[in-house]
Amino acid sequence: MSVRGSAAGIAFGALWIGAAGAAASTVELGAGQAGAPQHVQVGDELVLRLYSNPSTGTHWRIDASTAGAVLETLAAGRLLDPPPRPVVGSGGRYEWRFRAIAPGEATLRLQRIEARAVPAPSAPVRVFTVVVAAPAAP
């Protein structure tokens, strides 16, 4: 194979990889999108950001998710904007990242847990649920 032929092959491969990467998009969700169905394509990322305050016992946890076959977890509950130093009562936005890996429908459900909740400690006080649909390729 000539140098020119291998350079063309490399350029074509880079173009193909770039085109495949360009097709994926990011769908951003917050508390306002709870309950709204979300449509994504296989390869798209789903980014969920919710406020939490673990220093006071309030946090979110993924619960009863049927997302395993459709969504892959890339990052679970990382703090986006931490305070300069940990202070009780200072919360922030937490982020979960998922990627659609297969066609189908998935229910992503998170429960907000408050350790101080009455009557039972650690009782869920709020639920964030979203149904994600990824159509099969034509």
Image (cartoon, rainbow, N blue to C red):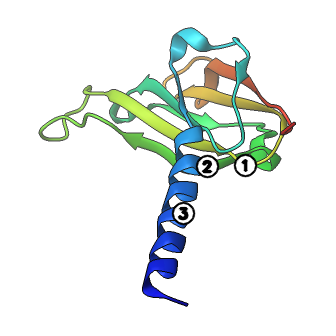
> Where residue 113 sits in the image (x, y, percent)?
56, 28
- What is the crowding at mark 2: few (fewer than 14 residues within 10 Å), some, or many (at least 20)? some
* Disc nearer the start of the sequence (3/2): 3
Q: Check disc 1 and give the amino acid type.
A: Ile
Question: Would you place residue 118 above or below residue 123 in this image?
Answer: above
Question: Would you place residue 7 above or below residue 64 in this image?
Answer: below
Q: Check disc 3 and give the amino acid type.
A: Phe
Q: Which mark is residue 73?
A: 2
Q: Is residue 95 visible?
A: yes
- Quote the CA–CA distance across marks 3 and 2: 31 Å
**Residue nearer the viewer, 2 or 89:** 2
Q: Which mark is residue 12?
A: 3
- Quote the CA–CA distance across marks 2 and 1: 10 Å
Q: Nearer the viewer, mark 3 or mark 2?
A: 3
* Disc nearer the start of the sequence (1/3): 3
Q: Please, which residue is most extreme toward the bottom here?
A: 1
Question: Would you place residue 16 above or below residue 135 in this image?
Answer: below
Question: At 73% from the left edge and 16% from the top edge, which residue is drawn?
Answer: 37
Taking 24 as reference, is 130 left or right? right
**Residue nearer the viewer, 105 or 17:** 17
Q: Nearer the viewer, mark 2 or mark 1?
A: 1
Question: At 70% from the left edge and 12% from the top edge, which residue is drawn?
Answer: 35
Q: Is residue 115 visible?
A: no
Q: Nearer the viewer, mark 1 or mark 3?
A: 3
- Helix, strand or loop at label 3? It is helix
> Where residue 124 sits in the image (x, y, percent)?
64, 24
